[in-house]
Amino acid sequence: MTRLLITHRTGYNYVRKVTLSYNEARMTPLTDPQQVVLESMLKVSPSSAAVSTYRDYWGTRVTAFDMQSAHEALEVTAVTTVEVSRMERVPAEGEVVTWEHLGSDDVINEYGDWLPQTGLTEPDPEVAANALQLATDRNPHQAAHAIFEWIKGEMSYVQGVTGVQTNARDAWDTRKGVCQDLAHLAIGAFRSIGIPARYISGYLHPRSSAGIGETVAGQSHAWVEWWDGEWRGWDPTNSGPVSDFHVSVARGRDYRDVSPLKGILSGGGGSTLNVKVEITRVA
């Protein structure tokens, strides 16, 4: 069990005043069987914003706010204490569903949100063909790990080559990308062979050796969950299972469902973005 204090600040400085803006923030972690939010606070500046909260279709907590007075900057600060307790469980014989069961009407109906491709996950034909080949003579759990291992050998983690709108095909063309590209690539491969898969956004404490009370520069991060009889998490960027140092914030079909902060505005004339994530292990 790990208890983490996370502070996430996102700020925009505008070239000219913004006269009106409507925004959504997905910056509050989830409470689920593997993690519990103990305390959370989200602050918007300027403080004149009208704020409300709701759960979106995917279960993510959304803070919606609109600002109807002129402003030259916007800052959203989320502070959360969360307790995480995960365990990688290797399935026993018979616990992994068969390919036939994955293709059944019951599974397709229950997990139908996580099977269709999106514009960001649609795989290159070469990726789909390799995924199918890797699935041959393997059960769905074994196939998932074989696909992760194959992607690890094909892709290089390189910052600055792709952006949040880059799709899996474009990332595959360059064989380079960051966490969201690796997640989109794996999700597209899984869905192409009938394995339900979803995109997870959250935070990663990058240094497990940090002492209690030590604050480190954290990271906004992305990884994958897939279903082969139960939901399992894997971090393709770090080539390992999701750990107590991963904090889930949002689940969706791809990045567009989980963007930390998005909105529409009038005015501004361009902006400068500043993001800072700090994580402190408190237990």
Image: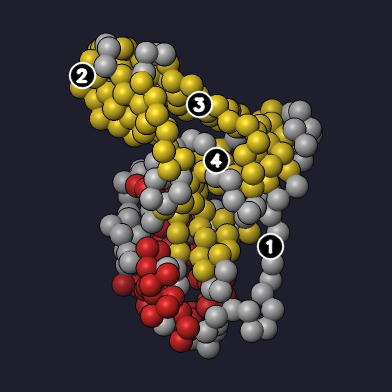
Identify the residue under disc 4: 29
The residue shown at (31%, 23%) is 66
Q: Earlier in the sequence, mark 1 or mark 2?
A: 1
User: Please, what is the three-letter code of the amino acid marked with disc 2?
Assistant: Gly
Where 215 falls versus 160 (above or below)?
above
User: Element type at marker 3?
Assistant: strand
Q: Residue 209 occupies which quadrant of the picture?
A: top right
What is the C-alpha distance between the residues marked 1 and 4? 20 Å
Residue 161 x/y as whole percent: 38, 45
226 is higher (above) or lower (below) than 139: above
Q: Badge 1: how crowded within 10 Å, few (<14), some, or many (20+)?
A: few
Q: Are marks 1 and 2 in contact (CB under 8 Å)?
A: no
Q: Distance between the residues labelled 4 and 3?
A: 11 Å
Q: Mark 2 points at which residue?
A: 267
Image location (x, y in percent) of residue 151: 49, 65
Q: What residue type is labelled 1?
A: Glu
Q: Which of marks 3 and 2 is in front?
A: 3
Q: How far apart are marks 2 and 4 (CA)?
A: 31 Å
Q: Nearer the viewer, mark 2 or mark 4?
A: 4
Residue under the image location 38 percent in, 56 percent down: 253
User: What's the residue type where badge 4 is placed?
Assistant: Pro
> Mark 1 to mark 2: distance in Å?
48 Å
Give the labeled residue for mark 1.
88
**Residue behind mark 3:** 42
* Residue 50 % position (x, y): 36, 21
Three-letter amino acid code at disc 3? Leu
